Image (tube, grey):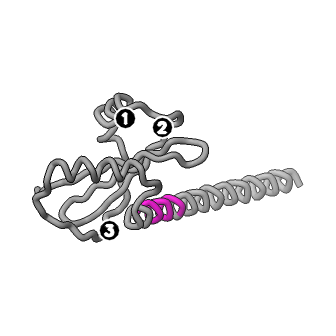
Amino acid sequence: MGKVSVKLTVFFEEPFWIGVFERIQDGKLSVAKATFGAEPKDYEVQEFVLKYYYRLQFSPAVAAVVKETKRNPKRLLRDAKKQTQENGIGTKSQQALKLQQEQNKQERKVKSREQKEAEDLRMFELKQQKKREKHKGH
């Protein structure tokens, strides 16, 4: 198993605070979204990550460019501060979330279509049975 990199971006999307987890593993990016509700404090975010990280449902992996470079710790702090000031999430993350959303939508459509067909078949059988019952006595 190779190196795994995880990044959490928390931003406000009317009316809730949203957390987007970006996981890069083996050169593939997958994303999960968590809704916090009210603005989470730092300790609440840390507690959420510790308790619920393994329950998150990540999107299917999308190819991502991974750069391996050594960086100055002060530069990392400045970049982290800059990222907290920015709004929004990266386009790769948005694509991965959209892909997951589309897959969930397709699964729901298939499931509801099967349920509807099963219900229609049950109603048809019930009508046929009632029709047979009416003709039995004559």
50 horizontally vs 73: left or right: right
Q: Is residue 48 above or below residue 79?
A: above
Q: Please tell me in which quadrant of the rendered image residue 56 appears.
A: top left
State the residue position of label 3. Answer: 62
Please tell me which residue lies in front, 138 or 101. Answer: 101
Taking the spot 50% from the left edge, 42% from the top edge, the residue there is 17
Taking the spot 13% from the left edge, 64% from the top edge, the residue there is 68
Mark in the foreground, 1 or 3: 1
- Which amino acid, by three-letter code, is at mark 2? Phe
Q: Please tell me in which quadrant of the rendered image residue 111 appears.
A: bottom right
Residue 14 placement (x, y as % from top left): 60, 47
State the residue position of label 2. Answer: 36
Magenta run includes residue 21: no
Circle number at residue 45: 1
- Which amino acid, by three-letter code, is at mark 1? Val
Q: Is residue 87 above or below residue 65?
A: above
Q: Which residues are magenta?
A: 96-105
Crowding near the residue tagged with mark 2, few <14, some 14–19, many ≥20 C-alpha atoms within 10 Å? some
Confirm or deny contact between disc 1 and disc 2 (CB under 8 A): yes
Please tell me which residue lies in front, 7 or 82. Answer: 82
Residue 67 placement (x, y as % from top left): 18, 67
Residue 126 placement (x, y as % from top left): 73, 53
Quadrant (top left, top right, bottom left, bottom right) of the N terminus: bottom left
